[in-house]
Image (cartoon, rainbow, N blue to C red):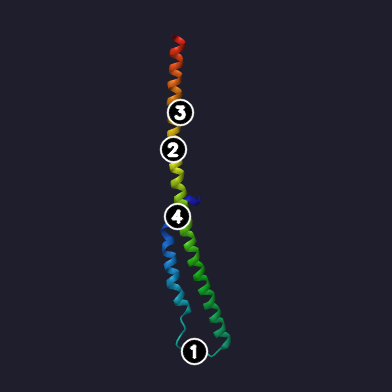
Amino acid sequence: MAIQFLPILKAVAPYLAQVATAAIPAFTAKPEVAIDDPVLTRQIEELQAASVQNAESIHLLAEKMQQAILALEQAGEEARKEFATYKMMLFISFGLSATTTIIMIYLLVR
């Protein structure tokens, strides 16, 4: 089931980092008009800090996801190479066993 999401993740991952980079300044921008209510000001500051932390976390997760996707692609390529090697070894061993069987039959009949 995770394999079905891999192409989607590969398509979205490069853009997550860009979105996070663009979003951080938007959440940290201070309004020109100062608010007099200290509770509201504190809540806004806490929300801005949480937003910045979330954006940085998303940026970090996007980078990690890109690394994971690259590692999966590399592992898949290595698995394909190993499979091709094993397949060739199988055909060679099958050919050798067929040749050996033919020689054995020839020697028995002779």
Q: Secondary structure at mark 4?
A: helix
Helix, strand or loop for disc 1: loop
Name the residue: 47% across, 51% down.
72
The kind of residue on which mark 3 rests is Ser
Indicate which label's residue lies in the foreground, 1 or 2.
2
Front tag of 2 and 4: 2
How far apart in space, not on screen, are marks 4 and 3 (Cα)?
Answer: 35 Å
Which residue does the numbered mark 4 point to in the structure image? 70
**Residue type of the residue flagged with mark 2:** Thr
The CA span between labels 3 and 2 is 12 Å
* Sooner in the amino-acid sequence: mark 4 or mark 3: 4
What's the CA distance linking mark 1 and mark 3?
Answer: 81 Å
Q: Relative to 85, is 65 above or below?
A: below
Q: Is residue 33 visible?
A: yes
Which residue, given by chain and number where applicable, does mark 3 sit on?
Answer: 93
The residue at 45%/45% (across/down) is 78
Secondary element at image label 2 = helix
Q: Nearer the viewer, residue 86 or 9?
A: 86
